[in-house]
Image (tube, rainbow, N blue to C red):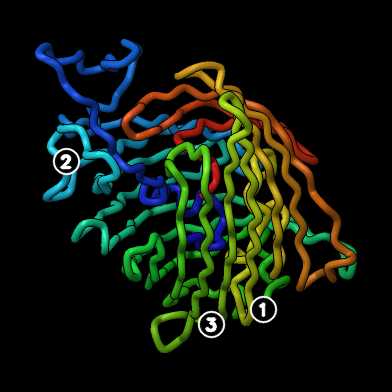
Amino acid sequence: MHLNVPALLILGMALVQVPIARAQTAATGSTPPSMFRDSEDGRFDMSRWLLDHRGFLPVPIIISDPALGNGGGVALAFFQRPHGGSDGAPAAEGATVTRPNLYGAGGARTSNGSEFYGVGASLHFDEDRWRYRGGVAKASINLGYHTPGRRLPPLEIDYNVDGVVSFQQGFRRLGARDLYVGLAWIYMDMDIGFDIASDRDNFTPRELGSKSSGLGLSLEYDSRDNTFSPSSGWLGMIEGNAYLPGIGSDSAFQSYRGHAYGYWPLGKAFVLGGRVDARWANGDIPFYRLPYIDLRGIGSARYQDTRTAVLETELRWNLGARWALVGFVGAGRTWGRHNSFSDGSDEVAKGAGFRYLIARQLGMHVGVDYAWGPEDETFYIQVGSPWR
């Protein structure tokens, strides 16, 4: 579930958002394969370390976001087969393999003084009929607030949010399909500070609310063949969250999101991906919780309003069994509080990158993307799909 909050505010919980692939175990011969070598092609591979030996995956966090400056940190992801899951033997033809559990912890700091650290988990129970995703993070983030300046004089305000974020979500499978209904509780307790004290006068008291507590409902369908680096199928999700004073929120508001990701193989070498993502908010939403354009190449919270919409496409060219190149382009628009839809302008970002299949049994690629948008250029470390 996306919280419609500047991305680094919840980066401490990002590990719980990493999708978990169906674990397919490789058959073992009389001679055990090397811990970090794949039994099929002999290449470097972390599948056995992660799945069979409860190893950890160190994920470098390299931050070059135009809104946050340069910086970095590290996250550790720990994998575990759920009780009753595969013990390493190959799965029977057509059998459903239980997804592994994931535990994570991480932290990072940037050159503009932003920092975060957090812990989280993604768990599966009762042959994946029940799921849990959740985490807690402590963050101090320095960002800039911008308005388009078409209806009102443009604003560019530097501010800091410092506090605790908690995200807890449970899912229940509906019938035998890959359809899940989810319930969530999202809580934030943030202190708001401004570089220039008088900038506080640009917001109403409710727009400056420090505590937000909301309950959410979601419906998710997932037919992707692999949830780390899909090659076919699609994911669709709709969700809504209601924040109310009766459950600890300083103000009453609602946030919604609807998104879909699709993947289509083009022959054996190419995979075309498409993303549509719409987010909106109603009520007395704090200014730092406004939806924003979420695209590679555009700074966090650079374009915000009560409505946002994004279209993005990505083409992956599989050079072989391990290496791939990617190219992507996307456009987003904001409107609502400061502009009508027709008054808004499209913000376009594009880029390219490479991938390496680091865990074949999980279908997990890692790599680097370089992207450029209307104002800036930057790069990203990717683990699995960049679409969350």
Q: Where residue 32 appears, x then y in whole percent?
A: 13, 15
The residue tagged 1 is: 204
Mark nearest the camera among 1 and 2 is: 2
Q: Earlier in the sequence, mark 3 or mark 2?
A: 2
Mark nearest the camera among 3 and 2 is: 2
Considering the numbered disc 2 on the image, is that residue within a helix, a strand or a loop? loop
Front one among 240 and 140: 240
Q: Earlier in the sequence, mark 1 or mark 2?
A: 2
Q: Is residue 219 left or right of residue 45?
A: right
* Residue depicted at x 68% and y 38%: 297
Q: Earlier in the sequence, mark 3 or mark 1?
A: 1
> Which amino acid type corresponds to the residue marked 2 in the rendered image?
Ser
- Disc 3 residue crowd, few under 14, some 14–19, many 20+, Cα 10 Å: many
Placement of 137 over or under 61, stated as above or below: below
The residue tagged 3 is: 251
> Which amino acid type corresponds to the residue marked 3 in the rendered image?
Ser
> Which amino acid type corresponds to the residue marked 1 in the rendered image?
Thr
Placement of 232 over or under 125, stated as above or below: above
Q: Where residue 285 appears, x then y in whole percent?
A: 60, 75
Front one among 39 and 46: 39
The residue tagged 2 is: 86
Q: Where residue 360 appears, x then y in whole percent?
A: 35, 27
Q: CA separation, marks 1 and 2?
A: 55 Å
